[in-house]
Amino acid sequence: MVPNDDQRALQEMARRFSRERLLPDYQKREKIGLMDRELIKEMGQLGLLGVDLPERLGGLGVDSVTSGLIIEELAYGDFSISAVPMAISLLAGIVVKSARSEVVDEWVPRATRGECILGLCLTEPRGGSDVANLQVRARRDGDDYVLNGEKTSITFANCADAFVVFARTGRPEEGARGVTAFLVPAATPGIRCTRFDDVGAAIIERGSVFFDDVRIPARYRLGDEGKGFTQVMVGFDYSRALIVLQCVGAAQASLDEAWAYTKDREAFGRPIAQFQNVTSPLVEGETQIAAIRQLCYHTLALRDSGLPHTAEAAMVKWMGPKTAYDVIHHCLLTFGHYGFTKETAHQQRMRDVMGQEIGDGTAGIMKLIVARERVGRASVQCHAQG
Ligand SMILES: Cc1cc2nc3c(=O)[nH]c(=O)nc-3n(C[C@H](O)[C@H](O)[C@H](O)COP(=O)(O)OP(=O)(O)OC[C@H]3O[C@@H](n4cnc5c(N)ncnc54)[C@H](O)[C@@H]3O)c2cc1C
């Protein structure tokens, strides 16, 4: 994939913002452990949020490939900050497609301006892979729905302004067909959040979201009753490619830093760049990341052309985060003992990308999806995420 002139201009803007505003304080933000709302607003002012959404809602009306280019650049500077535009593209995209127009007008422009963070509430304590069997209930009561239950492992649990929540409106035996999606403002009475002490990606403030008789107007339902599952699964084909581009951006940052170090650091009287055992793992990493990047953009290009891309999204999702983790690890080793200190950012990037070996569906589940796409649903039973 070679970006065209328009895509290159946006990519360049994102690159400049990422390197000047995000990268310098990437490690400082982890210590603070909170999402930096001012940075999100700056991204909104620059037009970097929800670029694939319609212009009348504050987007740029561009394709998913362009969205990927921007998210990759932002992840170079800060993996976790780039999760915000990723979530907006996924979730505001679902809202635009499925919500009533007044709900779209109320929430989506706020998201593209950087004034509203959106979270996805799908996973439940009893398991995230078998997501069709979710148990959080939404009971119709006059003009409202009343939500009860717990969602867990929710990115932005403690900083989101609204959640896209998947809840059961039908009977448990209906499985995926009994699931409906809702937009739920985070300030609605009856919502309580707890926070996890995570290994990485501290600023996404992941945690559980509890719904205790949470009453929301029926107009906040997204699409028809029972259609929620299809909505999120189509969305996952998109978000998986975007998430892997986040991993690609982070790995590229570590590779660039490692190459620079090999030119400066000397051993045995010469720069370590002259030792093939030093450069070979970096060359392999560059190659693997370049290949994964291309599969991501191929997946997005298929989406932009209206062609099926479920298998490609799952392929790149099982391979990408793990490869990025391994590549960053090699970069860390290139720095010798310095790499093992917190002076370099490699250890933080490793911990950050590791979460995406699990988030949005594990490698095991991704492989089930690819197999199902090849041999058919009847041969591979899998209602799991994807
Ligand atoms: C950083 C991060 C961010 C996340 N953000 C969100 C979010 O914003 N919203 C949200 O709803 N969820 C989120 N999640 C949750 C994530 O989607 C789930 O953790 C994931 O789907 C797996 O579910 P589980 O953790 O319950 O594992 P389980 O489903 O309990 O699975 C446990 C293990 O068994 C394996 N396994 C299970 N079933 C099968 C099978 N049929 N075949 C092969 N292997 C199988 C899995 O691969 C896994 O290794 C996030 C998770 C992380 C780590």
Image (tube, rainbow, N blue to C red):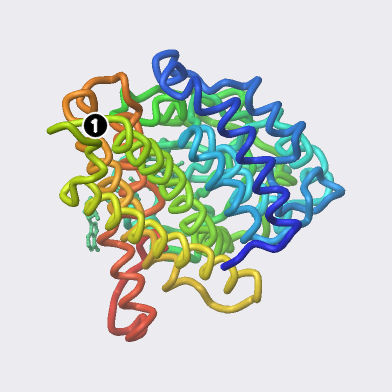
| Secondary structure of residue under mark 1 | loop
Residue in view at x 70 percent, y 27 percent:
42
The residue nearer to you, when weighing 140 against 57, is 57
Residue in view at x 55 percent, y 59 percent:
235
- Where 112 falls versus 24 (above or below)? below
Sort mark 1 into few (<14), some (14-19) or many (20+) by Cα contacts within 10 Å.
some
Q: Residue furthest right?
A: 56
- Where 289 falls versus 24 (above or below)? below
In this image, 23 relative to 5: left or right?
Answer: left
**Please, what is the three-letter code of the amino acid marked with disc 1?**
Phe
Quadrant of the rendering where the C terminus is positioned: bottom left
Q: Which percent across, then down, holds residue 114? A: 70, 31
Residue in view at x 29 percent, y 70 percent:
368
The residue nearer to you, when weighing 187 against 275, is 275
Q: Which percent across, then down, holds residue 288? A: 33, 60
In this image, 173 relative to 211: left or right?
Answer: left
Q: Is residue 124 visible in this depiction of the protein?
A: no
Q: Which percent across, then down, holds residue 139? A: 56, 45
- Where 61 falls versus 330 (above or below)? below
- Residue 318, picture quadrant: bottom left
Q: Is residue 68 visible in this depiction of the protein?
A: yes
Q: Residue furthest left?
A: 268
Q: Which percent across, then down, holds residue 33? A: 43, 18
For disc 1, the marked residue is: 335
